[in-house]
């Protein structure tokens, strides 16, 4: 289930607005401050200290990859694209950089609060999915290691079940996880006579 | 010799919420008189009145009319959130300012509006936390079918569920609708611990009368066990409610400590009155250059001197919770100088329930 949108925590959050100077820029900055954020502007380059910011709003009309101190799509915070031209090439760039939400120009107060909440929600979702994928990948590869270790032990054991049981007992004796024990078994099997210690 | 300054007055003195408008209008007019009589103030306000008659479609054209046909750059007006949102584009175009003197649901900070009455953390937040502590966490939410009702109920649902409570029902009536039988039936069946009423005008009066009748049939629905709470009930509506007002609990920045005739002395009246005086003070303090520049620039720099938060254009207010007893409000809980947090992002500004539980409520 998706968590409800959480409003708290925007107080004192730091926003960096990456946009060239413009007469309407102040309207956007005012609104960000009204919501409770502390605000800095930057152009043309994001300083490396920007990595500490809680949200980045970036101009899409004049933006390019080299402005960011991180690779496209790898921003460590929610990103909001400030879109003027809807040319497909610009939108594609906005998306590749990692837009979690859009704000249409002219710059102003409308939609800023909504964009902040949606961007944070999208960013948190993306981050939790990425973490889940990483942990599933790790478990998947650990499972392959266990299968391999069991098949090594099974050469000497009476059955696959007995081999698995043996691996489990090793893990208990060494006080490590089955996955870690499996890694040990595979490493030792690569040395001549290495498996003698395991039996 | 005083110079004249045009001042727009945009209240619906007819229509479903005219009792509120009337209190606001009276407050504004009284303050205009005070300003115009004061020898130390170098100008007099000339009120330019328009009455949209409670029709939300008429606010924007009438607001534009005031700004186009007179030199007014400040308007005292609007009751509903819908009407406030309607006039903002016209204000934007003319660089004019609306002084909005009614409690509302928050989540807005137009540079063209000064929000003088209570917002989210000064109305719905404290009354809900207080009610859940005093009566329990099973709520029934009702509201008029527009943004005030929707947003108040949405916020209440979020708060109640976050506190581990339950919402037994959430129902909306069209503005002006008086068919409340279904609502009453549902409340009777679900038996909540309290009811949050965000109905306005005729719907609210019809509901409160029917609910009082329900309490007469079934004692569970008396104010002692299942009260009705409101974020927008003031003295201004007590005469319309009569006996049906007894036991109602409201939140607001001020309540009158004595019975006043004809709905006088409400926080609506007082807020409109103060807004006009604040405007007079600001205009007196502004230099010629500042008067020529955008009003919100001046507020951004000096708003705090007038109790207006420069970042949000909302005001620092007292917060009081009070119950109608013998035709007047008795204050049950209060907090002083609560700074506004219309976006609910600044927990430091939220009133805390640190006092003892008020057993006096059940007296």
Image: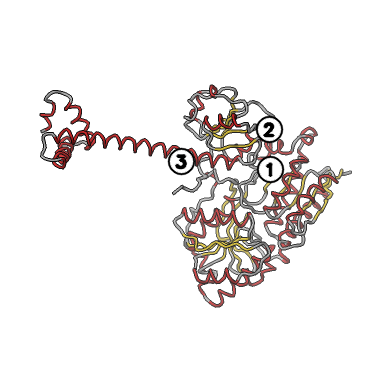
- Quarter of the image for residue B5 reads top right
- Residue at 78% across / 41% down in the picture? B94
Q: Residue B266 location, x and y as percent?
A: 68, 59
Q: Is mark 1 on a helix, strand or loop?
A: helix
- Quarter of the image for residue B290 reads top right
How many numbered tags mark residues here?
A: 3
Residue bearing the label numbered 2:
A24
Whether tag 1 and tag 3 are in contact, CB under 8 A, the answer is: no
Q: Nearer the viewer, residue A194 or A15?
A: A194
Q: Residue B197 location, x and y as percent?
A: 59, 62
Q: In this view, does B164 lie to the left or right of B71?
A: left
Whether tag 1 and tag 2 are in contact, CB under 8 A, the answer is: no
The colour mode here is: secondary structure
The chain that hosts pointer 1 is: B
| Circle nearer the viewer, 2 or 3 | 3
The chain that hosts pointer 2 is: A
Marks 1 and 3, how far apart at CA? 43 Å
Q: Residue B73 location, x and y as percent?
A: 79, 43
- Residue at 87% across / 43% down in the picture? B3
Residue bearing the label numbered 1:
B306
Q: Vertical placement of A106 versus B337: above or below?
A: above
Is the same chain shared between marks 1 and 3?
A: no
Q: What element carries label 3?
A: helix
The chain that hosts pointer 3 is: A
User: Residue A125, labelled with which disc?
Assistant: 3
Q: Nearer the viewer, residue B189 or B128?
A: B189
């Amino acid at each position: 289930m998706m968590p409800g949108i959480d409003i708290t925590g925007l107080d004192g959050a730091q926003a960096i607005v990456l946009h060239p100077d413009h007469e309407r820029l102040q309207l956007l900055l005012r609104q960000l401050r009204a919501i409770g954020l502390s605000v800095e502007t930057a152009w043309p380059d994001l300083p490396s200290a920007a990595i500490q910011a809680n949200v980045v709003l970036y101009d899409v009309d004049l933006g390019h990859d080299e402005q960011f101190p991180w690779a496209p799509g790898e921003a460590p915070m929610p990103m909001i694209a400030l879109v003027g031209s809807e040319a497909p090439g610009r939108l594609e760039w906005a998306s590749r950089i990692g837009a979690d939400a859009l704000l249409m120009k002219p710059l102003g107060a409308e939609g800023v609060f909504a964009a902040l909440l949606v961007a944070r929600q999208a960013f948190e979702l993306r981050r939790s999915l990425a973490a889940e994928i990483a942990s599933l990948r790790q478990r998947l590869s650990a499972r392959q290691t266990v299968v391999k270790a069991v098949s090594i032990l099974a050469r000497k054991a009476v059955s696959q079940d007995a081999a698995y049981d043996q691996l489990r007992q090793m893990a208990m004796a060494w006080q490590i996880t089955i996955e870690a024990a499996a890694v040990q078994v595979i490493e030792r099997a690569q040395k001549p006579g290495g498996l003698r210690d395991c039996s | 010799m005083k110079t004249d300054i045009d001042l727009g007055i945009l209240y619906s003195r007819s229509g479903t919420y005219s009792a509120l408008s009337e209190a606001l209008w009276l407050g504004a007019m009284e303050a205009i008189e005070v300003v115009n009589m004061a020898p130390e103030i170098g100008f007099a306000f000339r009120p330019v009145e328009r009455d949209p008659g409670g029709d939300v479609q008429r606010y924007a054209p009438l607001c534009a009319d005031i700004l186009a046909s007179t030199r007014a750059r400040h308007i005292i007006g609007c009751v509903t959130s819908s009407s406030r949102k309607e006039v903002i584009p016209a204000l934007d175009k003319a660089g004019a300012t609306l002084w909005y003197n009614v409690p509302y649901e928050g989540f807005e900070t137009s540079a063209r509006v000064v929000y003088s009455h209570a917002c989210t953390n000064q109305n719905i937040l404290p009354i809900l936390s207080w009610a859940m502590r005093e009566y329990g966490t099973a709520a029934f939410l009702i509201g008029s079918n527009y943004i005030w009702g929707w947003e108040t109920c949405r916020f209440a649902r979020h708060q109640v569920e976050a506190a581990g409570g339950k919402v037994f029902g959430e129902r909306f009536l069209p503005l002006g609708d008086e068919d409340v039988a279904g609502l009453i039936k549902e409340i009777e069946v679900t038996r909540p611990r309290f009811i949050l009423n965000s109905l306005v005008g005729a719907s609210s009066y019809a509901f409160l009368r029917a609910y009082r009748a329900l309490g007469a049939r079934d004692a569970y629905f008396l104010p002692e066990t299942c009260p009705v709470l409101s974020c927008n009930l003031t003295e201004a509506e007590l005469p319309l409610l009569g006996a049906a007002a007894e036991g109602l609990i409201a939140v607001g920045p001020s309540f009158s400590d004595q019975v006043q005739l004809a709905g006088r002395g409400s926080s609506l009246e007082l807020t409109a009155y103060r807004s006009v005086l604040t405007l007079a003070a600001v205009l007196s303090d502004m230099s010629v250059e500042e008067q020529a520049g955008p009003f919100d620039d001046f507020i951004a720099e000096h708003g705090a001197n007038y109790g207006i938060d420069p970042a949000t254009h909302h005001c620092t207010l007292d917060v009081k919770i009070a119950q109608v007893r013998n035709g007047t409000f008795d204050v049950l809980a209060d907090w002083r100088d609560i700074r506004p947090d219309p976006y609910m992002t600044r927990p430091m500004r939220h009133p805390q329930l640190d006092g003892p539980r008020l057993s006096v409520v059940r007296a």
